[in-house]
Amino acid sequence: MIGNYYDHVFLERLEANLVYDKYGEQRPLPENQGNTIVWHRLTNPTAGYVLGEGSTPAASVVSATKVSATLVFYGDLRSISDQVTATAVCPVVEETVQALGYGAALTKDNLISDKIGLASACSTGVANAASAALPSVFSQGFPVMEGNSNTVYWPTSGIATSIQNGYFSTIATIAHIRECVTQLKTLNAIPFENNLYKGIIHPLISDHVRRDSTFPTWMAYNNLQAMTKGKLGVIERVDFEESSNAMKVAVLASAWSTGYTSGGGSIVGTLIFGKGAYGVTKLGAKDAKINVVTGADKTDALNQYTLVGYKLAMSAKVLNPSAGVVLAYFSQLAP
């Protein structure tokens, strides 16, 4: 009963902090079936053709695109001494379970964001630089929108484009969101319920959008309920959800950078996407599992400490690059 109680506490804390996980296409990998999951997507056929009278058309093959991801195991383990448990004025074990729930949620969000977004490789800029002097924006598959020119850059070998002087410097506006939606509609990305796309936005970029001179009018006529609750709400068919754990990777200060980027900063990405944009898999369809271990044994004869930890096995992958776009912004503030 104690174990079930702690699992319940853990999952309550875990679910409250999920963002990327709940919007991904879930594809559980059964246990004892290897460590690689494969998604497949049939290639859309072209338009039909005229049939000649009495002629039998040649049959074309059905083709599909396969995308695979390899599971990675993650976890965290904390030790609580019996003296702390006996003297603390708060329930240390229960609060540790809750804190680890938050840690597990961050682990999942960080993993998914890294596998579908700007990638941890972007943090150095050197390995993926388009030239010897400029760091670059790195993408795991989704195109990247540059706000100065409203240009969409598709990644080549992971590189979207270099951070040239002034690139990605324009703060996000409602017009940029509209351009991203136009990109999705042009490529026939399928929206979610209520004919809306989803957007995961960092509070910094949310603040940028709120500075738009048309924002109060837009919200007053289209989204008053969200505005009164302090939410960004729906803008240009995008249902936004704010998360401080949204895409953000460091651009380190370095001598090889130009004056624009030499001080370092961060690339902050706002992912706007439709259905089937990315997939998430977990081993045996299981979420993070909490373990509380206590009791005397040969290594702890006096039962002097309690171990609390979690583990999970999961991975994520971009499934359809045409179903998402990342609006990127280079912030020269410290990452």
Image: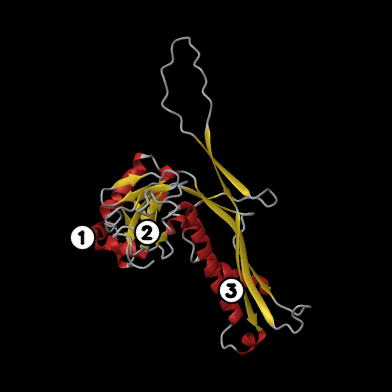
Q: In the rendered image, which quarter is residue 133 located in?
A: bottom left
Q: Residue 335 vs residue 115: left or right?
A: left
Front of the two marks 2 and 3: 2
Q: Quadrant of residue 335?
A: bottom left
| Relative depth, front residue between 59 and 147 | 147
* Quarter of the figure with the N terminus: bottom right
Nearer to us: label 2 or label 1: 2
Q: Which amino acid, mark 1?
A: Ser
At a point 63% along the width and 77% down the height, the residue shown is 79
**Residue 219 percent across, percent down from the top left:** 26, 60
Q: Is residue 52 visible?
A: yes
In the structure shown, which secondary structural element does the residue marked by tag 3 occupy? Answer: helix
Please state if 102 lies on the left or on the right of 258 as rendered: right
Residue type at the position of mark 2 = Ile
Q: Residues within 10 Å of mark 1 (few under 14, many from 20)?
A: few
- What secondary structure is marked by label 1? loop
Q: In 3D space, how far apart are the residues under numbered discs 1 and 3 (Cα atoms)?
A: 45 Å
Q: Amino acid at mark 3?
A: Val
State the image coordinates of residue 177 (x, y, percent, origin top left).
Answer: 31, 52
Q: Nearer the viewer, residue 235 or 105?
A: 105
Q: Which mark is residue 267?
A: 2
| Left/right of residue 93 with respect to residue 123 in the rendered view | right
State how far apart marks 2 and 1 are (Cα). 24 Å
Q: Position of residue 73 (x, y in %)?
A: 61, 59
Give whichever of 51, 263 is nearer the camera: 263
Q: Which residue is mark 1?
A: 213
Where is residue 190 shown, x and y percent of the image? 41, 43
Residue found 39% across the figure and 46% down from its top: 143
Q: Element at badge 2?
A: strand
* Residue bearing the label numbered 3: 97
